[in-house]
Amino acid sequence: MDKVWKFLKECGVYYLATMDGDQPRVRPFGTAEIFEGKLYIQTGKKKDVYKQLEKNPKAEICCFKDGKWLRIAGTLVPDDRTEAKKDMLDKNPSLRSMYDENDDNTIVLYFKDATATFSSFTEAPEEIKL
């Protein structure tokens, strides 16, 4: 898990893929943290990305750095607990201008039944169960 989180942080930006009906949607994200041993991301409940995840919680993220890439595929589970949202916002203070752990918009989600795969053009893939 630490290797996955570290690579995400080094990349800075990752791309989150969701489904909008039968149309894939991909957008850049930057928040990823470990809380209670799980990999979490954050968004707003009012955003299309969250509405898509409510309908189909299967998602994948991908990031690339120095000729290597990481894909994480799994199910994103909402966690509406104040302490989970506070942890994310405390670790990413720039989000506080838009979100608060006590508002009706902020949501954090963790990966469940997920597989992280490190790949490159020169090495065999490495899979890590999250």
Image (cartoon, helix red, strand yellow):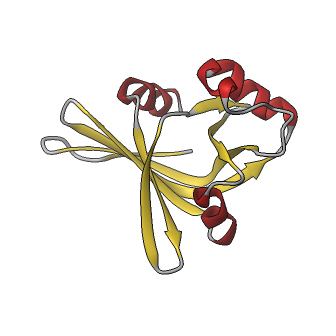
Total marks placed = 0
Residue, x 64% and y 19% (percent of image)? 93
Furthest-bottom residue in view? 22
Q: Position of residue 72 (x, y in %)?
A: 46, 49
Location of residue 82 (image quadrant): top right
Relative to 21, is 65 on the left or the right?
left
Residue nearest the viewer, comparing 103 with 109: 103
Q: Residue at x 56, y 34 (%)?
A: 32
Residue 33 visible in the shown view: yes
Residue 4, horizontal then vertical, whole percent:
46, 34
Q: Is residue 120 above or below residue 6?
A: below
Answer yes or no: is residue 57 visible: no
Residue 6 sits in quarter = top left
Which residue ends up furthest to the left in the rendered image?
Answer: 122
Q: Is residue 49 above or below residue 124?
A: below
Residue at 63 percent of width and 62 percent of height: 53
State which quadrant residue 76 falls in.
bottom right
Q: Is residue 18 above or below residue 87?
A: below
Is 92 or 6 nearer to us in this picture? 92
What percent of the width, then of the height, locates residue 74? 55, 57
Q: Position of residue 116 (x, y in %)?
A: 45, 47
Quadrant occupied by the C terminus: top right
Describe residue 46's horizontal placement relative to residue 120 as left or right: right
Q: Residue at x 49, y 34 (%)?
A: 30
